[in-house]
Structure formats: structure tokens, C-alpha cells
Amino acid sequence: METLHPRPQFIRNDWESLDGEWHFSFDDEACGDEKGWKDGIEKEQVIQVPFTYETKKSGIHDTCHHSIVWYERTINITEDKNVLLHFEGVDYRTTLWLNGLMVGTHEGAYTAFVFDITNFVQKGENKIVVKVEDSIDCAQPRGKQRWLKDNFGCWYVQTTGIWKSVWMEYVAPVHIDYVKMTPAYDKQEISMELEMNQFQCTEDISVSAEISFDGKVMNRVSTRVLSGAAKLTSTVLENGDPWNMKRWSPAEPNLYDVKFELFQNGKLVDVVNSYFGMRKISIEGQKILLNNEELYQRLILDQGYWEESDLTPTSVEALEKDINLILEMGYNGVRKHQKIEDNRFLYLCDKKGLLVWSEYASTYTFNRLAMERVTSEWLEIVKQNYNHPCIITWVPFNESWGIHDIRVNEQQQKFTEGIYHLTKAFDATRPVVTNDGWEHTISDIITLHDYEELGEAFSKRYEDEQRLLSNKIQHDKNRYPFAKGHQYKGQPVIISEFGGIAFCSESGWGYGNQVKDIESFMTRFKNVHHAIQNLDYVSGYCYTQLTDVQQEVNGLLTIDREAKVDLEEIRKVNTRRLK
């Protein structure tokens, strides 16, 4: 596959990847600032960005925790334009210097961020220095990263520093900063809200959007930019024909192209190429609808880990391989667990028609700092990934992690309710699952985690829908479906974690008793799937999990993506309900 832009949904042609070799130093004595490393670090070793020092692919492979690390490299500036320096993901607090001058800071591991370095660079060579501070604080959104010295349970080696791509692009002084695209499926229109990098501009600024499909222009709309913002609405129909809208779905993942052009005093100064999908997610009673038709979700849990690179994909081809394997096994979606994946993964899901539940990385304590960090970063994640048609559900919390007392603690309940309403305020188009697995407060879908290994026992437990959702009985692990003061209001129900079968021969753990051979595996796999598929009130499921992850060996694939069982047999089980 050719080189793919780090943000395939927001492309300018004039960009340059900064992935590759950087100078690198640990700063265990916290002396880098005092020693003036902002002007140049002590070049102890080199690292391959974007792989963290904990990984084999970085060239270092030190799995111990180091709270401060430094990076350095030079960039060559060749154009007389504004220069933007993009970081797709750095864990956790980033400080940037350029030619010895501080440019800025950013906090958060899972959001992309950008610095305008125009006033700090000169023509020719320039020195970038990056300091990253990480911690084992449980008030820091960690996801599946351990905070103890060694791996334990389902928590793995930590991720520190630059773990996603770094890149640079040249732009005009006035340029498009952000676009929010909302499909109005029933109206057969697309709404586009644009923000510029400057909000106070006395010059004549206008913007246009050209909508096309398969190279053929559908429509072109334009408007003036006022106070740094503009809104455009366009039909997606060719010649007004109401029958030719190209909808997006797993069966037909059609994508419209859109080209945004920005004009300053009549002169073209910025061009951004993007795309969108015409699709609608809605809920009617207990049913989830995609494009006004019932959607039965066959999801697989995916933690996005690789043997040599941990949370960082080894390549774009590796991401595409995972998606192809998921589709081959008959799944129509993925729950990306405790991680915000690379933008190129979401692009490939858009392109191939794989549904995505986007789940945030948990904290593991509840205090003011944790609440502030979660709120700030989560809302930025929703903003940054809003335009991807593949994302159909937002999941800000999982299994009461970071909100351990939510069942009885009113403050923790109010926190989740606040995140729910803030998410819906920005995105009214998608369901929000407030606390995936159990102890729900406000939630558009009721999700249950249950690792019962016997299909017959599973059927028995779930046969009485009213009793199960009454909140009078525990459904799994001494957990109730709802927090106290909350009750079932007729929402759709999804079994969003189950399975997790491991083989006896494997070194590590799975859920329940391990199985001795493939025949035993498939018998258990079939029986529990059939039990769920036979429940009329359940709208889908999510099987644990796609691949093994370090000590957790309950994947359908090894961490090297080798199949443990016949994938065609997995597909037959997944597609059974459709027959």
C-alpha cells in the first residue's frame, strides 16, 4: 500500500512525515530542564518514532517505567508559508521547543494536537526538542496500561511518549482549521460547519464545497466566512433525482468526496480534500436502526496490540489485515477497547464498511483531577472523530473503572450523566453507552458483560427479560444492570462482552475453564452464541476477543494474527441469525 496520509479525512497536498529516527534520552533524575536540554538533549540513543521505548520496534525495548523522556530531531523548512507541526498521539504531557524557544504544551494521551510553529522557524534547518512526562497516576486516563511494576490481570506494559505519527504541513496564514460534517439521511443532504484558524479577519473570506461521487460532481455550494466560521448545506443527489443517493452501510460502504476551497479577496488560499458517508443511526424502542432498517450487531472486541509495537500499529497494512480478518469471520463491527485507534484505521473502516464502537481509556480512581482530564480529552475525541461514518456508538466509560462506587455514589452517577449530556450536545446523531457492562445511569443502549461459558446456563439466565432488567437480580460478577435510582426504560440490549475462550496449552489466561482442543472450543463457542442469537430482545453482541494480548490469551487469533481455529467456522456461527 502506498503511503497513506496520517489524517485521510483532512488532506492537504503539502505535508511531510516526521516518523523515523529521532535522538532520545531518559531523564530519570529530572535534570533535563536544568541542563538546558531545550537547546539540545544528551543524545544517549536513537528511537524509531512513533514506537515507544517500551517496544521492540522502537529499537530500545525497555519495559520499565520512566517518567520523563526527551526527543530531538531537525526539520528542514523550504517554503515561505505557515508551518503546522502535528502530533497524532503522545502519552502523556508534551512540551515542545523549537530552536530553543518554547512553543507550547499539551496534556492527554489519546487526542491529536497541533502547534503553529511559523514564528519559531527559519528557512533551512531547525531543531525540534520534545519533552514528555508520564506517570503511574490512576487519575490519568490509562486504558489497559499497567500502573504497577509488572503486568497483572488484563493490564499490560505501559505506553510512554510519542506513540502515533508526527508530521508537518505548510498552510496559508488564513486556512481551514476544522470541519464538522453531519449527514441528514432522510433529507438526502450533508451539513458542513467550518472553522478557520482566525476568527477576526477584516478581509473578504469565502469558502466553497464541491461534492462528488466516483469522480462525478453532484453539487457545489459556497458562502462567506463571518467571524471565522461558515455553514454549508448541500444535496447529495445528482440532478435532484431522489433515487440516486449513495448510502453508506457495511454492505455498501459508499463514500462521497468533498473538496473545500478557501478564498481570500477572491484568491484561492487553501484546499482540503475530505469525504463523508450518508448513513443514519437511530433507535426505535428496543431496536437499533441503520438507515431506518433494523441493525443486528455482530461485534468483536479489539484492543489493538501488536507483539513488537504494543499500542502502535506496525503499519497501515497491519491495520488493513485486522479489518479483513474481522470481516472474513462474519463480524460487521468492532468495539475498539480502551483505546482511540489510528485515524487510518477509522479511514479503512469507513472504506470497507466495518462498524466501530469508540471507547475511551479509563482512569482508575475518582477525584477532581480525573474528572477534569476525562471531560476535556473525551470531548476532544468526539470532536476529532465525529466525521467518520463507521463510528456508530460512543462509549466513555467501561465496567465502572474509575467510577467504582457508581452503583450507590450519587456524585459518580452525576459525573457519567454529565458526560452523557455533553456528548449528546455535540453529537445528537449517535447512541452513547454511559457505563459499558453494568451499573448504567443514563444510557441509550443497555450493555451487559457476561462470561458464562455454558450456552444452556446463559439461556436460562436471560430467558426472563423483565426479571433480568428489573435490577433486582445480579446478572454477572455481583453486578446489577443499573445504578441505584436508575431503571430500565425500554432501550435496546446488547451483550457487549462474552466468550474469551482460551486453550489449555496456552501460557496465560482466558475466561472460565480452558478448553483442550478445537472441537471443545467450537462446541462452547457455538452454544453460547446460539443462546444469545435466540434472544429476541437482544440487538447484538460483542465477542471477546480478536487477538491475544500479552498475558491474556483468549483471542481468536494469536497476537501475531495466526488463526487458532477455522475462520470459516467462526463465520458460519456469526451469520447463522441471518438465515
Image (cartoon, helix red, strand yellow):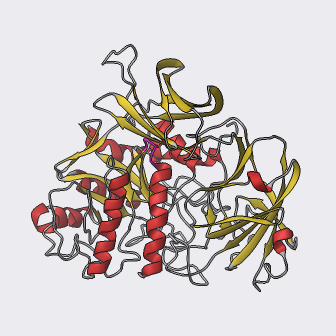
Rendered position, 363 above or below 525: below
Which of these two is toward me, 379 or 346?
379
Identity of the residue drawn at 35% across and 60% down: 422
Left or right? Give the position of 547 relative to 50.
left
**Magenta residues: mostly which secondary structure?**
loop
Identity of the residue drawn at 39% across and 32% down: 190
In magenta stretch: residue 389: yes
Left or right? Give the position of 14 relative to 231.
right
Which of these two is toward me, 492 or 103?
103
Residue 317 occupies quadrant:
top right
Dividing the image into 4 quarters, which one contains the N terminus? top right
Q: Is residue 338 visible?
A: no
Q: Position of residue 81 (x, y in %)?
A: 76, 41
Dividing the image into 4 quarters, which one contains the C terminus? top left
Q: Which residues, given as a range, are shown in magenta?
A: 386-390
Q: Position of residue 142 (x, y in %)?
A: 52, 72
